[in-house]
Image (cartoon, rainbow, N blue to C red):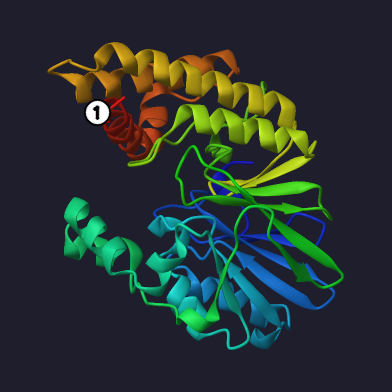
Amino acid sequence: MNATSLPPAQDLGHGIVCIDTLQERPGLACCYLVGRDGEYAFVEAGTAHGMPRLLALLEARGIAREQVRYVIPTHVHLDHAGGAGVLMRELPAAQLVAHPRGARHLIDPSKLIAGAEGVYGKAAVAEMYGEIAAVPEERVIVAGDDHRLPLGAGELRFIDSPGHARHHFSIWDETSHGFFTGDTFGLSYREFDGPGGPYLFPTTTPVQFEPEAWFGTLDRYLSFDPQRMYLTHFSVVENVQKLAADLRAGLQRYVALATPLRGSEQRHQALLQALNQDALAALKQLGSTMPEARVRELLAFDIELNAQGLEVWLDRPA
């Protein structure tokens, strides 16, 4: 199934619904509604533009806004957390759950906004993310490693998961035997699904890519023997052991292709070329028949961000 044919909300079993927030295009980013015994949590908040879709899902399914106990962005990058404050205003009984390194930026998002505007400009940030609102401190739960929160008769368990960002946690759901992984199990767009299975690749978005920490996070994931991983970009994937090996190999390739370019004058363009070639080779190995021009089009934004993040990593003092 390609992304354009995906329904706006997919029931994935285990009381979990994937909601396409239609960020930039269908099949790019989602939030999850997790329901347990009449209590609910949103995993990820998306952007303010996607918030009406989350509320519309509640209404369509007869779920009162007061039944939502938690809003849980996996980390504070704005495609995951930009809409948190706006969403919280609409959910009177909810608490926001945040990583210890990220909570302060959701209580006072001024640095997040300034950072994004410094990269994209004020008008572009408004267009991409909409309103970025503060969350009252008294409504924020700070969830460190192995923090557990009740949801219905079960619980959600929070696992510190650095590698993509230091302010990133993942959420273990024993009911589904799966992790909500944010960006730390990579990106996998359904357009690329083919005979060899999903195409999964790293996201090295600036500014905290740390490959060794990421390898540790993958080891931690696998220690739970997960049966499925709920990606923000995009939806659920299974065959976790194979995909973890694919992601580990992808991270190793990224390090290997970036390291020789550390002092190159044409480093950015060289990284873009190398990352595109890596994607095309991986897709060919998986049996993809997607035309090269379409691959480059779908991956252009991610590859640009990955190149930027690898450059930050290369410039970091040893």
* Quadrant (top left/top right/bottom left/bottom right) for the N terminus: top right
Left or right: 11 as drawn, with respect to 302: right
Query: Where's residue 136, x and y in %?
Result: 45, 82
In this rendering, is residue 226 above or below 219? Answer: below
Res. 289 visible in picture: no
Q: Look at 54% across and 81% down and name the residue there.
A: 139
Q: Look at 33% across and 74% down and name the residue there.
A: 131
Q: Quadrant of residue 47?
A: bottom left
Tag 1: amino acid: Asp
Q: How many marks?
A: 1
Query: Where's residue 176, x and y in %?
Result: 81, 52
Between residues 191 and 51, which one lies in front from this camera angle? 51
Left or right: 53 as drawn, with respect to 267: right
Query: Where's residue 35, x and y in %?
Result: 76, 69
Judging by the rendered image, the residue that carries numbered circle 1 is: 315
Q: Look at 51% across and 80% down and name the residue there.
A: 88
In this rendering, is residue 229 above or below 251? Answer: below
Q: Residue furthest top?
A: 260
Between residues 244 and 313, which one lies in front from this camera angle? 313
Left or right: 243 as drawn, with respect to 120: right
In this rendering, is residue 143 above or below 55? Answer: above
How many other residues sit within 10 Å of disc 1, few (<14), some (14-19) or many (≥20)? Answer: few
Q: Look at 58% across and 39% down and name the residue there.
A: 190
Between residues 297 and 34, which one lies in front from this camera angle? 34
Res. 105 visible in picture: yes
| Residue at disc 1, secondary structure | helix
Q: Residue furthest front?
A: 318
Between residues 296 and 102, which one lies in front from this camera angle? 102
Query: Where's residue 193, x and y in %?
Result: 61, 32
Q: Quadrant of residue 58?
A: bottom right
* Quadrant (top left/top right/bottom left/bottom right) for the C terminus: top left
